[in-house]
Image (tube, rainbow, N blue to C red):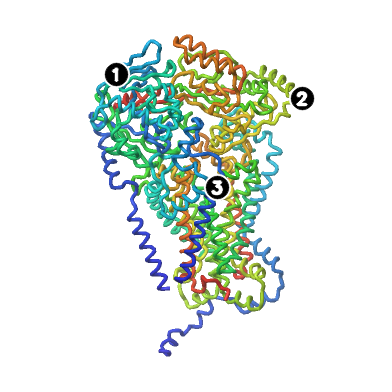
Amino acid sequence: MLRYIFKRLVYILIALFIIITATFFLMQLAPGSPFASERDFPPQIEEQLNAKYGLDNPWYIQYKDYLVDTVSFDFGESMKYKGRSTNDIISESFPISLTLGIEAMILSIGLGIFLGVIAALYHNKFPDYLASTIAVLGISVPSFILAGLMQYFLAYKLDLFPVSGWKGFNYSILPALAIAITHAGFIAKLTRSSMLEQSSSDYVKMARSKGLGKWTIVIRHTLRNALMPVITYLGPLTAGVVTGSFIIEQIFAIPGLGRHFVTSITNRDYTVIMGTTVFYSIILLFAVLIVDILYSVIDPRIKLKGAKK
Amino acid sequence: MKKSNLFLMLMLLALTLVLAACNFGAEEEKPASEDGKKEGTEETTEGGPKELNLVVASEPPSMHPQLATDSTSNAVLKNVFEGLTTVKDGEVIEAAAEKVDVSEDGLVYTFTLRDAKWSNGDTVTAEDFAYAWTFALTPENASEYASILYPIKGAQAFNLGEGSAEDLGIEVVDEKTLKVTLENPTPYFLELTAFKTYYPIHKATAEANDTWFAEAGDQYISNGPFTLSEWQHGGSMTLEKNANYWDADNVALDTVNISMVESETTAATMFDKGEIDFLGAPYQSVALDVIDRYKEEGILNISDYASIYVYKFNTTDEIMSNVNIRKALTLAIDRQGLIDNITKGEQTPATGMVPAAVKGFEEDRGYMKDNDIEEAKKALELGLQELGLSDASELDIKLSFNTSEAHAAIAQFIQEGWRTNLGIEVTLDNSEWQVYLDKLSNLDYQIARLGWIGDYNDAYTFLEMYNSADNGNNDTGWENAEYTALLEQSNKEQDPAKRLELLKQAEAIIMSEYPVAPIYYYTNLSVKKDYVENMELDALGNIYLKYVDIKK
Amino acid sequence: MAKKEWQFEKIEPEKFNMVGMKQDESEKLADKSVSFWREVFLRFSQNKLAIFGIIALVIIALLAIFVPVFSPYSYREQLGIYNAPPSASHWFGTDDLGRDVFVRVWQGARISLFIGITAAVIDLIIGVLWGSISGLAGGRLDNIMMRIADVLSAVPYLLVVIILLVVLEPGLLPMIIALSITGWINMARIVRGEVLSIKNQEYVLAARTLGASTWHLIRKHLVPNALGAILVTMTLTIPSAIFTESFLSYLGLGVPAPTASWGTMASEGNKALTSAPWRLFFPAFFISLTIFAFNAVGDGLRDALDPKLRK
């Protein structure tokens, strides 16, 4: 296992290198600059700005700088937010997104698996239809519509929650729900389908014939095996959710990290683009690694080294 | 199995720990300040601390007066700093300066500073102004707005790396006297000294710490009616009344809470729920969705705004180089219909290049009629002939705009008008902002939208950009020698009436060649709670919180 | 100790009655020789929800084809009645530019259904192939293939879209390209996960030892057993494609305005939630209905195709 993890770390480094390279060249290709606005300024000033932020260097120097930045994990000063370092931006906003993301993940996993199990246990009966309908609604109503509706009805009309901001647990409920519901719907569908597959397999029949109760079987046998696809989905999803959602942060005015992924690009704030991308990539690559390790924890038959013996 | 249960337990434990460790923003501080707010509102009725709650659309990119470029930063800077002059009720009045003497040739301005203090108690000196202005002009500091200081003698040369700081027309006579020499007599110079790039900065602090402006706190020293006391990046800002401000007795508010709320819809809901006291530019804007409702409720304020929404024509394009085609397209726009049904803000249909909010341009100059289909058809026919085309459907025209639902709606309305009235099929071309700017400056478009907001209340700011095809803000490829000459003349003219006449002549020229189709002059929409008083927008869209009061 | 265990494991005979088929029934089944696909069809047609799904999809498709042709209004015609609520002449009301929402919903259905289904099919093909090859091969190839997927999902998508925006003329093709760049990754990951757990099962090992080719393994063993997860993932792909389309159109990559799509109508309608809720409700309703119908059909198909669920 350790050998496997070490090998994967090497691959993670290679992947990270490719991500940085690709992002760098995409940034170079994209038109615009961090200083562009509808109001033009003299070319001499633009030169000064470029010199100040190292944008006048040839591309290979700039490329090298980003690689050095990544190794030292110091991405330099934001080109849009004057006097602010990319590291500060990430370290101030990430805890907020992380808190919200974990809340949303707990909600979506709890809700999703619950609905999925109910639906599978009562396959093609009323509880199945009800749970599936809720799940499908969750999938087909996107978070931005859901967020708007919840904000208008629950926060404004019924006055149950604050409209926006981030000043306590109260403020996190609606955004966490808005993020969670789509994912919960999908997790429910996924759980249902793989539970159904498991429920007709031999070991479940065996367990049933041993006289174990329905729920005992679910908890001790089926669910465990049925979670395989769910965990596959959860890995990258967690990486995405804990680093924040642009739309939800925008609607609920949450000072999280998610908005920086989008605004840094629309601002062409190169240092922040690179910083957030590397940060997200590391979280994603490790989340995927954890998923692979979890596979063999859940199903010992899965051998990570590959089956070609 | 046991092993995996243990594993799951551990994971759960880890999650709980993380959750416990995470803070919700500033949980420890915030509840306290929330309590404070509640007490505050109760006390206000008894004459206690007065708080005003506002929202802005984004994190201000820079709180350095000389480096800031955008309206959000400006909305805050306007209230924490103060220039030599300021604007009240549309008139320029003295602020940090007590007295202004202008030489007879209009070239030398002598400002006598009043006995004003910085927020840390230091005296505001002429040196602070000179330092700030020189900072903005120093090429290495790369201030994007430095060009607004160009009327000062030697400023342009120094900023572009051709002169030196010693040759600048900025002279510190003594601690209280600042003498400024100009390149040309600039009749609107006292408008400029109210602009953010002309604000002073505290020299000692700025020299000691080159990122003094990045955080709130003791090092953020300002000379305006308020101080920046808290700044949670991306979340909120708090302004406190500046006890050291020279006119502190006339500042009513004690605290201003500014939250950053990006969504207009959210901001409107916050206003409806009473979480904020005022909504409208520059403190976010009133969403289209709620305009009609606020109008019905009778709380919508509409004020003129010195800014203009235009469609530019690329005069280097094969089709758009034809003046008659440009004329036809310009005339066949139902501006009033657009305003009544789509933009809804009671904007003024623009039939000239200078907004009606600008002094001397209040009256319609009669260059054209709104939605003049008859004339448009005549011009179109002429244009088609000149292009050697027989039918309008042969024209292949693309209308570009940048990503925004409002621009898209306006474009679709005008597109349909051109199709039904002139028979011209226009394709809409929507692109991301920076891609769009790139297209614009490379003249890679045919028709493109742009908004222009005046920096100072003078026609020159709306006409200057077309003085040469090379002007970075022109973007149309159009130029006219006579036009350029008139503008130059206006800069040297000292008699305001004659100068106005020159500017109007220039406007008439550009309005006869149609490099630009004016659409409407913006208005600023706002709503406020009844207890908020004196919260008025000036023609440049600024709000001075200094004058605002709350009477509950 | 052995004795004890024996006692514990003693099984009461009646327990055997609870599960499994009766002797005569199983012989009955053996008698009939029904082809696989006929059986699938029979089982599918017994599933009421699935039949409802099919009917709903057919109706939506017919409306999308015929309403824009026969409607008295066109999707771009501005009628001068702005934000009017639903009425006899405008069943779904009008929008901010005074256009009939009913005809726009069905005009939009054309684009959204096309985008949703095309994206789903492309994601399905790439995702299933990528995931199953990766999972089956294991080792270095698996590692490389999955890291490629990681790289693609980590590189800022918005930047890629901006480059596409510069390089390509807006329209359906760049839209499909933009949707396909990352759309399949989820599918590939899920299929790989399934393959990993299936491939070490006895029957697959058996097939392998008997010399079955990789392609045969994918087709006959892996895909059928991962079918449930694949179908579920597809049902997520369609709505996400519909809404990504609206985001991409907003950025300027899609079919230019005034052409409608459900996604753009819903996101514009969302901004008019309080003043003209019908502009959000109708497109959102039909998106949900379509997804629901696809889901019902997918679930029905899965049940019908699953050999283990045979009764």
Cα–Cα gap, marks 3 and 1: 54 Å
What chain does mark 1 sit on?
Answer: B
> Which residue in the structure is indicated by mark 2?
B390
> Which residue in the structure is indicated by mark 3?
A26
Q: Picture coordinates of residue B50 (x, y %)?
A: 27, 31
Q: Is residue B389 visible?
A: yes
Decide which of B152, B376 is in the foreground and name it: B152
Instruction: Mark 3 and mark 2 in contact? Answer it, CB < 8 Å.
Output: no
C249 in relation to C223, above or below: above
Depth check, mark 3 against mark 1: the one in front is 1
SS at circle 1: strand
Cα–Cα gap, marks 1 and 2: 68 Å
Amino acid type of disc 2? Ser
Q: Is residue A279 visible?
A: no
Amino acid type of disc 3? Leu
Q: Picture coordinates of residue A116 (x, y %)?
A: 50, 61
Return the mark for residue B112: 1
